[in-house]
Image: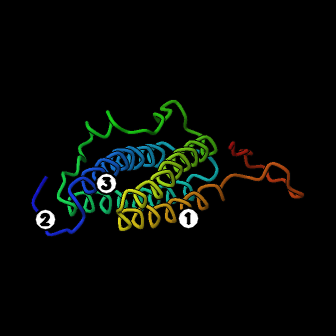
């Protein structure tokens, strides 16, 4: 732990740093998953999905930075190497055998949803342990996750529409 004038107790800061590093690993993994989809997407909606995934990756990278800087600002280390992220990420591995855009949309939506769910779990936890600023940061990132999830899911065709298009249909699973 690095010395700091932060007025939170060392116990609270240590616990918050642990929470933040768990989310940092997942955010780095999520960024790599979105870039994997970005590089490998194929199909009729290629350019729209390709550009969407690039924009999502930029947002995820910003979240990684915010998480890492909070951990460092609390006097702790930010464990942000790819090796650590691979070992510690709570996200499911990205399926490497897909190419069609609907499959990538589903996979990225699933990863975003899982990331958001874990963030939500820790919003109350960090507030309860006495770190409202980390709780607020997780809330801010969760809003961003929900926003990006909306953008990604908007590319999935609704299951029952009055006007059917020739594009493949993806039904998002809960």
Marks 2/3: CA–CA distance: 15 Å
Write the residue at 64% across / 55% down.
Answer: 153
Tell which circle, 1 or 3, labels the residue nearer the N-terminal end. 3
Task: Specify few, some or many for label 1: CA neighbours under 10 Å numbering under 14, 14-19, or 20 or more.
Answer: few
Q: Which residue is mark 1?
A: 147
Q: Secondary structure at mark 1?
A: helix
- Marks 2/3 in contact by CB < 8 Å: the verdict is no
Residue 96: % across, % down: 47, 32
Quadrant in the picture for the C terminus: top right
Q: Closer to the N terminus: mark 2 or mark 3?
A: 2
Contact? badges 1 and 3 (CB < 8 Å): no
Q: For the point 43% across and 58% down, which residue is it?
A: 128
- Which one is in front, 172 or 162? 172
Please tell me the numbered disc located at residue 16.
3
Query: Mark number for residue 4?
Result: 2
Q: Is residue 66 above or below residue 117?
A: below
């Amino acid at each position: 732990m690095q010395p700091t004038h932060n007025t939170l107790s060392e116990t609270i800061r240590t616990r918050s740093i642990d929470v933040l590093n768990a989310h940092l690993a997942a955010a780095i993994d999520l960024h790599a998953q979105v870039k994997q989809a970005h590089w490998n997407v194929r199909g009729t909606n290629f350019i729209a999905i390709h550009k969407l995934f690039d924009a999502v990756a930029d947002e995820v990278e910003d979240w990684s930075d915010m998480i890492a800087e909070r951990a460092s600002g609390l006097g702790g280390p930010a464990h942000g190497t790819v090796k650590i992220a691979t070992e510690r990420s709570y996200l499911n591995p990205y399926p490497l055998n897909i190419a069609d855009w609907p499959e990538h949309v589903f996979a990225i939506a699933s990863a975003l949803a899982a990331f958001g769910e874990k963030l939500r779990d820790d919003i109350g936890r960090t507030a309860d342990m006495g770190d409202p600023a980390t709780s607020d940061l997780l809330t801010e990132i969760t809003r961003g996750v929900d926003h990006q999830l909306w953008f990604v899911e908007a590319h999935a065709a609704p299951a029952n529409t009055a006007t059917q298009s020739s594009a493949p249909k993806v039904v998002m699973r809960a």
